[in-house]
Structure formats: C-alpha cells, structure tokens
Image (cartoon, coloured by chain):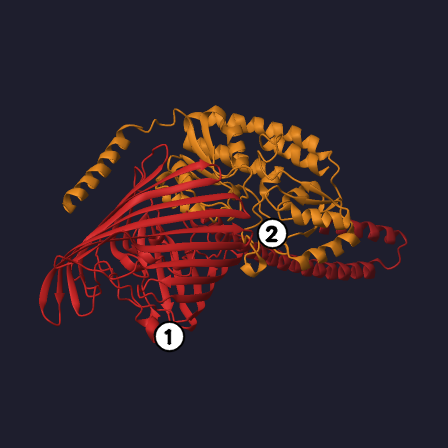
Chain colours: A red, B orange
Amino acid sequence: MKRKALLGFLLIFFFVSESFGSDIESKIKNLEEVLKTQQKMIEEQQKVINGLKDELKTLKTQESSKTEKITEKEKPAGVSGLFGGSALTNPNISVVVNTFGYTSNIKGNELETRGMPGYSRLGIEKRKGFNLESAELFAFAPVDPYFNLYVTVPITEEGAELEEAYFVTTSLPHGLQLKGGKFKSGFGRLNAQHPHQWDFADIALPYRAFLGDEGIIEKGVQLTYLPPLPFYTLFGIEALQGDNEVLFGSDAKSGPQAYSAFIKASLDLEDNSTLLFGPSVITGKTKTDSIAENTEFRGDSTLYGFELTYKWKPSKTRGLILQSEYFLRHQKGNLEDTALSTIEPLKRNQDGMYVQGIYQLNRWRLGARYDILDLFKDDYRLNGVSQDFGKKPWRATGSLEFNPTEFSRIRLQYNHDRSRRDGKTNHEWLLQFVLGIGAHAAHPF
Amino acid sequence: MRKSVFMFIFLFLFNTTAVAEVRPVRKALSDGVKVVATLPWIGSIINDIGKEKVEVTVLVKSNQDPHQIEAKPGMILQTRKADILAYNGLDLEIGYLPVLIESSRNPKIQAGKPGNLDCSQYVTPIEKSLSADRSMGDVHPFGNPHYHLSPKNILKAAEGISERLSAIDPANADFYRANLVSFREKLKEKQKLWSIKQLKGKRVVAYHKMFEYLAAEFGFEIIGYLEPKPGIPPSAGHIEKLIGIMQKAKPEAILTTAYYGRKEAQFISQKTGVSVITVPHDVGAAEKAKDWFTLMDHVLATLE
C-alpha cells in the first residue's frame, strides 16, 4: 500500500520533472536506483518491524506467565480462610522460644529433689540462673479436604522431642470430630494449652501433683461431638495409651490403658463476658514408683476434674480472666516395697485446686494465683493405716506481664511455694521471655 | 463399675447423636440460607442481596475492634449451624477464624467448600507486600484488609456474594441476581451523592491504616499515622514527631475509630489545633449507620 503510494508519487514526480525534460533515460535510471534503494529501505524496515513484533510477542508471553505466576502465588489468599498463614509456606511453621531467668532462696541441689510428699517425687526442673525451656516448633496444614495435621516438636538443649503429632477430621457429619495420634488430652482446661499460652510461667500445683509438669499428653484417639443445642456444649471421649508418668506410670507396655471423658459448656452472659465450665474424668491402670522411695504401686487411678473460666473483655485495652479447676484423685491398688518385697494394700483420695485471675490493661497484664492441695480430702490409707504427710501443700503466685505485641511476652513472676510440706518456703522469682515467629495456629478460647 | 460408667457415656453420646440426626432433619434451605458473617458490614451486604431468603448472624459486634476477636464457644456453635460462613479475609480474622472453622465441625464451611465465602477474593486489594515481616507491625501481606469503605470493591464483593448465594440456593438464584441489580442501581445513585462531597485534596492524619481505600477513591491524602507501625500503639516519641509533621503540613483532621483510645488523638489535637473525627468503622458503630449504605453516608458526612 505504502509502496504503491510511493510509486505514484514518484511517477508524478517523474512526469513533472519530464516536462522540464532533458535526459529522460538517465533520469529513469536514476529513478530506478532511487526505487531500488527505497525498496531496500522498506525491506529493512519490515525486518525491524518483524523483529519488534517478535520481541513484543515474547514480552507478552513473559508477562502473561508472570501474571499466571502471581495468581498462582496469590492462590493461598483464597484458601487463607482455613489457617490464614501469612507466610506462603505450606505447611505453616512457627517457632516459639521460651526462656527465663530464675532465682530461689533454696539451694540448687535441694530444688532438684524438692517433690511434694504424698503426691509426687519429681523435683523442680528450673535451675538458678539462665534457663532455656525450649524452642517449640509447630507445623500445621490441611492434609486434604478431610484432615488437618498438627505437629509440635519442642527442642530443648537435650534434643528434640515429639510432643504432639495428630490429625483432626474436618468433614465428619453431625458435629462429630475425630482426633488421633499423640495429643494433649481434652481433660481439664490448662491441660490442652501449650506452655506459651499459660497465664503463668509454670503449671498450677494440682497439675504438677496429679499429672506432672506437662499434663496429659498421650497417644490415642479422641471423639468429640458438638450438638446443635441453644448453647455451646461439647462432649468428648478419649481412649489413651495411658503412660502419663505421674498418674499412670510411664511403662505402659500394652494399651489402651486409660480412658477419659469430658463435657465443656459455655454461656455468653452478655456481649463481653463468657463463662466456660464442665466436668472431666480420666481413669486408667497405674504402675508407678513415684509414690515413695523404693516402692512400686500397681492399681487403678481415676482423676475427676471440674473447670470454670470467666472472661470479661469489654475492649481491646481491658480484660479480666478468672479461672479455677478442682481435681479429685482416687487410687486403689497394691504398694510393693521393692527393698523388703512386701506388698500392702493402698487406697487414697486426694484433691487439689487452683484459683487464678488475670487483669489486662493496655499491654500490661497483672496476675494472681493460689494453689492448694489436700483441700477437702486427705485420706491416704496404706495397709489400712491413715498416712499423715504434714501440712497442706500450697503456693501463692503474683505476676506482671508486658506484651509488646501478641507475638512477644515479658513476664516477671513470684512464687511463694510451700508445696514441700516441711514448713520451708521456696521464694521463687522468674523473669521470662516468650517470643514467637512464623505462622502460628490461632489459639482456642 | 468404671466400664459401666463408660458404657453409659457412650450410650449417652450416641443417643444424643441419634436424636440430633432425627430432629432438625436438614430443613433443606426452605427456611432460609443460614449465613454467619464475621463483621457487621458483611451481614449488611448479605441482607441486601439475600433479603428474606437468608438468615444472617453477625459474630463481631459493632463496638468491637475487628483485630482483637477471640473464638468464643458461642461463635463456634453459630458456625456449626451455618450454611455459609462469610468473612472479610486478607488475614483480618486470622486470630479466630481458623479455630472457628475447625472447631465448628461443619463440613459445609471448610476451606474450598462453597459455604466458605472469603469476600476479599472478589476485591482488588491495595498495599500488598509479600515480603513483609512482623518488624513492620501487624502487616497484611495480601493487602490492606479494610476495603469495606470502598464502594468499588464493595460492589465486587456484592457480586461475589450474589453468585455464591445463587450457587448454594439455586432455587432462588434469580431472586439474588435481581437484588444485586437493585443493589447496583442504589449504589450508582448513592455514588452521585457521594461524589459531590468536597474531600479532594484534603489532608488528614489517621490512627490506623483504616481509610486507605476511602482516601484513594475520594481523593484525600493521609499524611501520617498515630500508630508508628500498624497495630503498634503510639509511643511518646512518635507522637512528638507526628506533632512536628502536623504543625508543618497542617492537615485538616485526625481520623480515629471508637475502639482506639481517643486519649492520644485528643492530646495531639490540643497541641496542634487539628480536630479529631471519630469515624464509624462499621455498620452499627454509629446510630445512623444501620446498613452499609448509611454507614458510607455517615462516614462521608463525618469527613466533610
């Protein structure tokens, strides 16, 4: 098209110039030359245009692949609803570091063996000076539309430990949910919480006495049922291997040896305050040497619990949590004196409870806790003879926290600990730092 | 003895399961699609699209800070009964939504199911920063989550909601689509009124990164924040610096919402003479903000 126009123009030029006419032939030749050079130029331009076209094409494909990549990348935003990990990693991984400084008026070697006579011979694991509780590694993600998977691996200086590894179903009908693997039992309230969620640096005394510092973490299965009632009521049952060191003894060779059941109910008293309460029971076979030195106990243990939590949260900057649990343990069986090889019947009913309150103002939280054992029951019969271990174990705790963000916590805590029953007070001070990074699963209420 | 106790518990559990199965009999969707919405504005849009065919429950109250919500058991129970769980997305509900979804034991609202309605998937987020880390404060890598004061994005969200309702309740699809048409019409009318508001070129200071979409669409400029970083409460040093900036730049207002402390804003106001405006952040936060449209009316009226 262009070329034709050019030709036309040249022709006109030719004829016009011809009218001035002198040497037509040479002019035609000249013109032919001109045309040829123009042809060349056009061809060259075409080449350039083609080149540009190609370049544009590659650019376009690059760009479209880029946008594809972006949409691929952004896809997690679409499914972020389930876990909402801000990181694009799958699974979501987080690490929580728990480290603290500790002082006490009691000598270090005494602390190591400072148990609670009649309950547990386990000493205090905290060491004077700097302590590194753990770096807890959490990983979780949906497996497929039917399961979510959770793994918790606290790494301590001694090494890594598989604390939890369990699946949770998401697609069972009728409000049912199955959990399986190794997990924190639904018994009680504190039990299912990870140490970094606790309102104090250490677990309440009844837990320490009846279940140990870590609570019930067992291999097993849990079935829960949430019926469509007018208010929240969750029913749960568990079959567990039953190797909790304190309650059952850690050498459960064959299982399941323990079973538990719990109900958790909740009422919203008003917009800002909520009540959560319910009974729990766990029962199982026990074989433990933790009752007294050179003994072995074989028998049955049943622990009953009742939990009550009240939360008031009128605004972001203020809040109050009151929480209490009461435990009653019943044990019956035989106590063998391993030194003398004598066996005597043992029966005991023991109880304990704690009451705690946390008041939050802006980024500060003030806490108080009172733990007591042998509250109503002090009934420990060895060979039919009532045993007396002395004064009731108790502990009073005060704490002050500063939480710069929801990912960091600095806590100062004081324990007035009289759990040893010997009249000697353990004045404990802790300065604790709990810091978390990564995509951490949201905590339950 | 113990065995019989457990038999009893088992029986009790299965008994209740059986009863639960028989009684409600999944009344199809005849008595309305049960929608659980996290935030009031989502409930409002769904009511506009679904009208009497939906039954909406809103989890977060209008006086609550949407960043600071806990998964209360009562919310879990609501979610358990839902046909649709509609939420803001962009990680705004990250602190409680995952717990709600898993604990609800409701297969219909799990991720990837039609009942899981993330409204943000329909909008165009701003301020994406995929390389963010938490030293930058409470950043949302997928974009600023407060798109609900953006008419453009709300229209897209409403379209998405209409689509989703139609998919879940196909018998009433025409009804939802018709309501979307009237929603669009109403929005067009409203936007005519809103566009004459004199906000262009105005400069303000805000407490939180809450009004970015609004500023972009209505042409005003946010020159500083009371929060040194998103989600981090203002420090004395930062406030001092901000006062310095404000004395030079002379913005026209300090924007905050009811749930943020007004103390700092008032303090800055006293120092600089710039007035504080408490903007209703969601439906119900002001008496007149009864639905999303009146919320926008009210927001723009307070800003003018």
Task: Kindly state the secondary structure of the residue where label 2 is placed.
Answer: loop
Tell me, for residue B127, which label it has, or none: 2
In space, the residues marked 2 and 1 are separated at their CA atoms by: 56 Å
Neighbour tally class for label 2: few under 14, some 14-19, many 20 plus, Cα within 10 Å: some
* Circle 1: residue type: Lys
Image height of B232 relative to B37, above or below: below
Neighbour tally class for label 1: few under 14, some 14-19, many 20 plus, Cα within 10 Å: few
Position of B122 with respect to A266 (left or right) is: right
The percent coordinates of residue B119 (x first, y second) are 51, 40
Image height of A254 relative to A147, above or below: below
Decide if residue B84 is in sight here: yes
Q: Residue furthest right?
A: A20
> Closer to the observer: label 2 or label 1?
1
Q: Which residue is mark 1?
A: A107
The percent coordinates of residue B293 (x first, y second) are 61, 31
The percent coordinates of residue A274 (x first, y second) are 43, 41
Q: Could you say which is closer to the camera, residue B214 or residue B224?
A: B224
* Circle 2: residue type: Glu
Chain assignment, label 2: B
